[in-house]
Image (cartoon, rainbow, N blue to C red):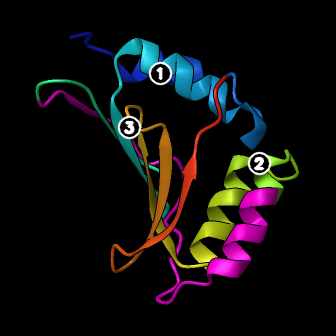
Amino acid sequence: MKKFTIEQIKAAHHKVKSGADFPAYIQDIKNLGVTYYETFVADGHTDYYGGKEYKRSSPAKYNMLKVADSSNKEQFKVDLKAHQDGKTDYQTFCKDCAKSGIKKWAVSMGEMTCTYFDKSETEILVERIPPY
């Protein structure tokens, strides 16, 4: 089992300029030993998991955002597409997620999926991560 650090993950994330860079980022952190992670929209912190209950958490990335109580799946899909096309930066994407009621997203390296959840932990959208 590889024991990754938040500093290593930050270095990989630093290369990401838009949603279009996401597949390369996933490959980079997978190579570090990350098997799963959850990013929380309210403050941007992420919990990263490796094998045998190994976990590292990043600090909050920004001031608290209010996540809407109800989700708007259709608006979220529009905002996600814009982000993946490189039309929005990370901060804008997080604000859009909060407005659309997205509480967090979870990435599984084994399944190569990114799943978005609302406040009630209901799956709003599951996407396959394209190969890098």
Q: Secondary structure at mark 2?
A: helix
Which-is-in-front pick, marks 2 and 3?
Answer: 2
Query: Left or right of 56: which side holds 105?
Result: right
* 77 in the magenta segment: yes
What stretch of residues is rendered in magenta? 53-81
What residue is pinned by disc 2? 84
Q: Nearer the viewer, residue 6 or 131?
A: 131
The Cα–Cα distance between marks 2 and 3, rounded to whole angstroms, is 23 Å
For disc 2, the neighbor class at 10 Å (few under 14, some 14 to 19, many from 20) is some
Q: Is residue 121 above or below residue 113?
A: below
Q: Secondary structure at mark 3?
A: loop
Q: Amino acid at mark 1?
A: Ile
Residue 105 location (% of width, % of height): 46, 56
Q: Amino acid at mark 2?
A: Gln
Mark on residue 29?
1
Which-is-in-front pick, marks 3 and 1?
Answer: 1
Q: Is residue 51 above or below residue 128?
A: above
Q: Is residue 8 above or below residue 24?
A: above
The Cα–Cα distance between marks 2 and 1, rounded to whole angstroms, is 19 Å
Q: Is residue 18 visible?
A: no
Q: Amino acid at mark 3?
A: Ser
For disc 3, the neighbor class at 10 Å (few under 14, some 14 to 19, many from 20) is some
For disc 1, the neighbor class at 10 Å (few under 14, some 14 to 19, many from 20) is many
* 44 in the magenta segment: no
Query: Left or right of 31: which side holds 90?
Result: right
Query: Which of the two labelled residues, at mark 3 and mark 1, occupies the earlier sequence position?
Result: 1
Query: Which of the two labelled residues, at mark 2 and mark 3, occupies the earlier sequence position?
Result: 3
Q: Residue at 65% of width from left, 35% of height from top? A: 130
What residue is pinned by disc 3? 58
Q: Considering the image in quadrants, where does the N terminus appear?
A: top left
